[in-house]
Image (cartoon, helix red, strand yellow):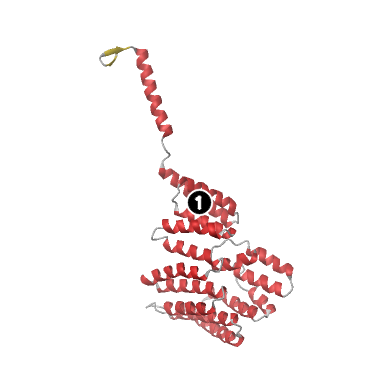
Amino acid sequence: MFLCNNRPMNLTSARSAIAAFLLSGALLTAQSPSNPASQADDAASLVKQGQKLSGEGKQDEALALYGRAMKLSPNLYEAHLATGIALDLKGDYSEARQHLAKALELASPENKAQALRAMAMSYAFQCDVVEVAKFEKQVFDARLAKPDFSGAAEIANELARVELECADFDAAYQWYKTGYETALRKPDISDTDKNLWLFRWENAQARIAARRGQREEAQKHVEAAKAALDKANNPDQARFFPYLTGYVAFYAGDYKTAIADLLKADQHDPFILCLLAQAYEKSGDKTQAMDYYRKVLESNAHNPTNAFARPLAK
């Protein structure tokens, strides 16, 4: 017999009481919130699926997955970063920056540089060089403070390239110069790396001169870049030379040479594909031009080359 308040309870009543107790426990379990760790894992999985779709150019489908991820985990850094990138690729820059700003707010120290560079690239799509510089310079300063001279130099060159393609030639020159001088500050820099950075510096000066219409000056730097490249003896860098000569030829109005040289350059680089499209267009070959503009739009990278090429191709 069960006792309650010292009063006997029959077997039927006891069974009913136990059933009610178990049922109430089941209801409480069913109504309790999902495991936060499980939700975070599910959200991270959705972001990874979305990134794959984004890489395939399916931005709307990717954004739908990112949206589901943010419902599960509203403060997931990766979800906001990926959303900002996808929106940039769609051309929805204002909305993209809202998510990139949130990503910056949520970024861990390890992710801070990634978030800053993503925001910089968002502004690069619209050639807002003032805003690009504001975010890139933070990365440059942080790397310089470590000190990581090579890493800082790479960021200086990244910023310089944005300045160049957005037609701020003086700023481009200064940042490329800063990049070169910063790289040489590395205490144990090898002769090979010295020549590699000299190649990049001469390459930059040639492109700046070409954009300024200084043909002879551009050619002088092309020759100096080739000499530095030969001394560096770095086969991986050889593919950048036809890009340089094609670039200089394009801005000199020699579209036949530009096409011939650019076809030898990296055919996965959307900026090179865009130069080819423009060269074909200026040569009167609109069919080839349209083919290359379409190829540009197959790229879904969030970097300087696509920041210039994609809006133009659209």
Which class describes the residues within 10 Å of circle 1: few (<14), some (14-19), or many (20+)? Answer: many
Q: Residue at x 58, y 54 (%)?
A: 59
314 left or right of 28 in image: right
Looking at the rendered structure, the secondary structure element under dot 1 is helix
282 left or right of 211 in image: right
Label 1 belongs to which residue?
47
Q: Residue at x 61, y 85 (%)?
A: 215
Q: Position of residue 300 (x, y in %)?
A: 58, 60
Residue 233 seen in the figure: no
Name the foreground residue: 233 vs 97: 97
Image quadrant in which you'd find residue 307: bottom right
Image quadrant in which you'd find residue 87: bottom right
Q: Residue at x 58, y 66 (%)?
A: 306
Residue 89 lies, with reference to residue 235, above or below; the image says above
Amino acid beneath label 1? Val
Residue 314 lies, with reference to residue 263, above or below; the image says above
Q: Position of residue 123 (x, y in %)?
A: 52, 65
Which residue occupies the extreme left position in the image?
6
For the C terminus, the quadrant is bottom right
Name the foreground residue: 86 vs 149: 86
Number of numbered tags placed on the structure image: 1
Q: Position of residue 164 (x, y in %)?
A: 55, 75
78 left or right of 255 in image: left
For the N terminus, the quadrant is top left
Name the foreground residue: 45 vs 196: 45
Q: Residue at x 70, y 78 (%)?
A: 256
Residue 87 seen in the figure: yes
Q: Position of residue 313 (x, y in %)?
A: 64, 65
